[in-house]
Amino acid sequence: MNSIGIPVEGLRGRLERVRGRVSGSVNRGSGSLLALSVLVGVGAGLGAVGFRYMILGVTYLFTGHRDYSAAGHAANPLAPGLGMWFVVLAPVVGGLIYGPLVSRFAPEARGHGVPEVMLAVNRLGGRMRPQVPVVKSLASAICIGSGGSVGREGPIVQIGSALGSLIGQLVRVTESQLRLLVACGAAAGISATFNAPIAGVFFALELILRNFDTESFGFVVLSSVTADAIGRAAFGSHPFLALPGFDFSSPLELVLYAGLGALAAGVGWAFIRLLYSGEDVSDRLWRGPAWLRPAAGGVLLGLLLLVVPQMYGVGYPVLERAVAGHYLVLVLLGLLAAKIVATSLTMWIGGSGGVFAPSLFMGAMLGSAYGALAHHLLPGLAAAPGAYGLVGMGAVFAATARAPITALIIIFELTGDYRIILPLMFAIVVATALSGALTADTIYTHKLRRRGIDIDAPRSPSRMAQISVADAMGRAPHPLPPDEPLDRIVARFAAERSDSLPVAEPRGSLVGVVAATDVERAISKGSGDGTVAAALARDVPRLRASDSLEDAVHALGITDDEGIPVMADDDQLVGWLTHRRVLRAYRERYGGERPLLGDQRPREVGRVERPQVVELLADPDQLDRDAQLVGDRERDPALGGAVELGQDEAADRDRLGEQAGLAKTVLAGGRVHREQRLVRRLRDLL
């Protein structure tokens, strides 16, 4: 305590103030968000580089080769006594490592990752857990390196997106900005992995954000370019795949490419059906612990690799050989079928990896086989088989992901040959249209729909969105003049009994807000003489009277101040909104028969030094419908502890703990209380 009776804050409070200032800076304009976009691009680019080296290192440790898919049935030189049988053990050992890692620390790291990113952006406000990048990178590198027949693109998308979410949450950006930073991370991951910055941008816009907002475009481009520059610095500017040249001889050949697009739709449909129907069967058959499932299923994967070693890992060398014409038609068709089974099996047993690269692999096998047959039957019309292999890559990905623009751009960037555009567009359009007729879901959205989540369905407005700020705001405290001296500021705080006061010009335009903690810091540093209100004022989020309480909750969540100003259209201060007034307006509108959170009496879980009120509001649209409280662990008494969800869906277990403001914590009379029970069904929230 100091001479004016304001308690001295600890280190935690100082860090919160710094974070609040950064948040205010970000919300003032786009300049700070541009800087965050670059930071996300740097982080995702470095993450992509590190992830690729991790895969190489783990693969060498398990096989003695940089990429075993091109090694045939060679023995591991690090364990020559096992001969070629080591491939049976590799997935088992790998599963024993990444299985417990995923089950214990981040269940959402299981699988191919992109659906979790789509869910975070479209339903969870962009929030992802901070441990996801670490767990996902380790689990996926071990899974791929030990023989999992999956890709590295899905994991790096989830890693980059989680990094963007972490950075955004640290500086407390708005929800829309947080979603944008998640998309920036996804774009950066694709860009650095494929050396394809344009494809990274459209992947983020088409699949993650699911819109082409011009305001979002610039930030996503900046992250993608930054990550690509880092990737090129590490691996060079050449494409990571060595693909043959393309030759388009006749417009009549478009008919053949249309046929390839139709076959690609069928392959994409078969892959989706086998992947998820097999997962259902595996879920019914497996009765052991989740952490042991990858190791037990690794026996089956190992036996498959013993027969078809080309399925080991991502398999890019095999893809290159296929489009170069080094395989017979029957071999190509066998590799196509084997890849569908191997990738599905890796997912069935709980592996961690992407389906982007496997779909490109399948397309290359399908296209090369189709091209070889066409060239044999119509030598004067059909181009070389490799050309069809390239087009098939884009067509199968478009059929599985329903992302035609991304598919078009990624193949174009990989080849750098504009002549591929016409047949590629033709095949992709046919594949996308027929895929939509065969199934309503993509390989990504189908996983979410199985959990009862339809991200394409229109969302009904929450009750909070139906109340305006004008209905909830109170009278604004009399503003401080910009030249108000420090001693009079202290007197005003004592009289107002408020944690913050506005500072405004004589004509009413707001300068900023002075917090009691800023006054205390100025006095403790001995800088009281000559300090005026304008020097202490900081920017905070501002609301309009016409905004909804849903907007208000997001604004209150990114500031540490007790209240925030409400402005008129002419930027005059017209009101003041606090957490208390938000709750009061809600209860006045909807009554007390359905409380905001829970229906149990709170229990004491701790104490604080001085009375204050912290009220965090829930947004029911961001929560899954069947969440229920199964744990009641105190992580931090001041924050009310950690909450877990039921075991029905691994990725849902921690979602409740992800949302800022899922519990209402009331610190009153010197005691900390928390709702003992949240909701049984989230639709009963509002």
Image (spheres, rainbow, N blue to C red):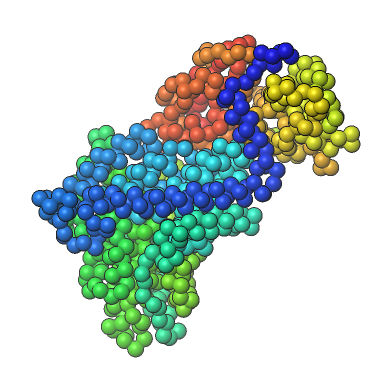
> Is residue 386 placed above or below 112 in the rendered structure?
below
Q: Which residue appears at 60% of the width and 54% of the height?
A: 219
- Quarter the C terminus occupies: top right
Judge left or right: residue 551 versus residue 264.
right
Residue 578 drawn at (x, y percent): 70, 27
Indicate the position of residue 581 as horizontal and vertical percent values: 71, 25
Q: Quadrant of residue 6?
A: top right
Q: Is residue 450 left or right of residue 124?
A: left
Q: Nearer the viewer, residue 589 or 609?
A: 609
User: What is the quadrant of residue 424 in the picture?
Assistant: bottom left
Q: Quadrant of residue 64?
A: bottom left
On the rendered image, what quadrant is the N terminus found in?
Answer: top right
Which residue: 43% across, 49% down? 47
| 653 shown above or below 633 | below
Q: Is residue 435 left or right of residue 342?
A: right
Residue at position x 66%, y 49% from top?
31
* Observer-nearest of 599 and 96: 96
Q: Is residue 180 visible?
A: no
As drawn, 559 above or below 389 = above
Residue found at the very far left of the displayed protein: 81
Callout count: 0
Who is closer to the viewer here, 504 or 183? 504
Query: Residue sitting at 25 percent across and 60 percent down?
Result: 69
